[in-house]
């Protein structure tokens, strides 16, 4: 993902920590716990220009459900702003960068190989 963005002339700042955006607690019905996790997530990413996610469900959750969790809160405008800056990776490539055809065959093979190696190391 990072190599593809750099190839598209993007400056990338990546987090090394896996973060949860609050969706699991929200889906389980724990709204207060979800709100706590969402608040931490927003504090970490409040200064970032754009947020890219590997999965569409994360950006959709931030756009559609963060505003509901913080409907009457003082951070409601910050929440709406974060939703406007959140994209799934391919959505960002096509909708923001307007890349429709990018030659990536060798790059994708390398990225896939890296992902497989990471999965193997995690076991």
Image (cartoon, grey):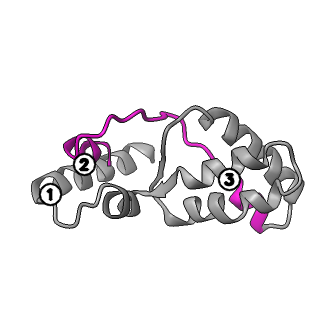
Q: Badge 3 local density, few (<14 within 10 Å), some, or many (20+)?
A: some
User: What percent of the width, then of the height, locates residue 119?
Assistant: 39, 51
Which residue is painted at 32% across and 51% down in the image? 115
Which numbered circle lies on residue 80? 3
Which numbered circle lies on residue 26? none
User: What percent of the width, then of the height, locates residue 103?
Assistant: 11, 59
As helix, strand or loop, the secondary structure at mark 1 comes to: loop
- Dot 3 or dot 2: first in sequence order is 2
Report, in whole angstroms, how far the alpha carbon at label 1 lies from the one at label 2.
8 Å
Mark yes or no: residue 109 visible.
yes
Part of the protein shown in magenta: 1-27
The one of 20 and 53 positioned closer to us in this rendering: 53
Q: Tell me if label 1 and label 2 are in contact, CB under 8 Å.
A: yes
Which residue is painted at 23% across and 40% down in the image? 9
Q: Tell me if label 3 and label 2 are in contact, CB under 8 Å.
A: no
The one of 1 and 97 positioned closer to us in this rendering: 97
Which residue is painted at 56% across and 59% down in the image? 59
Can residue 41 be found in the magenta stretch? Answer: no
Report, in whole angstroms, how far the alpha carbon at label 3 lies from the one at label 2.
28 Å
Q: State the residue position of label 1.
A: 104
As helix, strand or loop, the secondary structure at mark 2 comes to: helix
Residue 90: name its quadrant. Answer: bottom left
User: What percent of the width, then of the height, locates residue 91?
Assistant: 40, 63
Q: State the residue position of label 2.
A: 4
Please give left or right for residue 37 compared with residue 117 in the image: right
Please give left or right for residue 26 compared with residue 42 in the image: right
């Amino acid at each position: 993902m990072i190599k593809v963005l750099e190839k598209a002339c993007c400056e990338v700042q990546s987090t090394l920590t896996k973060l949860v955006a609050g969706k699991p607690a929200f889906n389980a019905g724990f709204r207060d716990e979800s709100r706590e996790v969402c608040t931490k997530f927003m504090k970490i990413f409040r200064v970032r220009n754009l947020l890219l996610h590997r999965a569409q469900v994360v950006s959709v959750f931030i756009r559609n459900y963060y505003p509901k969790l913080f409907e009457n809160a003082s951070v409601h405008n910050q929440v709406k702003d974060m939703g406007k800056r959140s994209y799934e990776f391919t959505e960002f490539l096509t909708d923001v960068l307007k890349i429709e055809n990018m030659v990536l065959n060798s790059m994708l093979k390398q990225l896939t190989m890296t992902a497989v190696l990471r999965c193997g190391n995690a076991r």
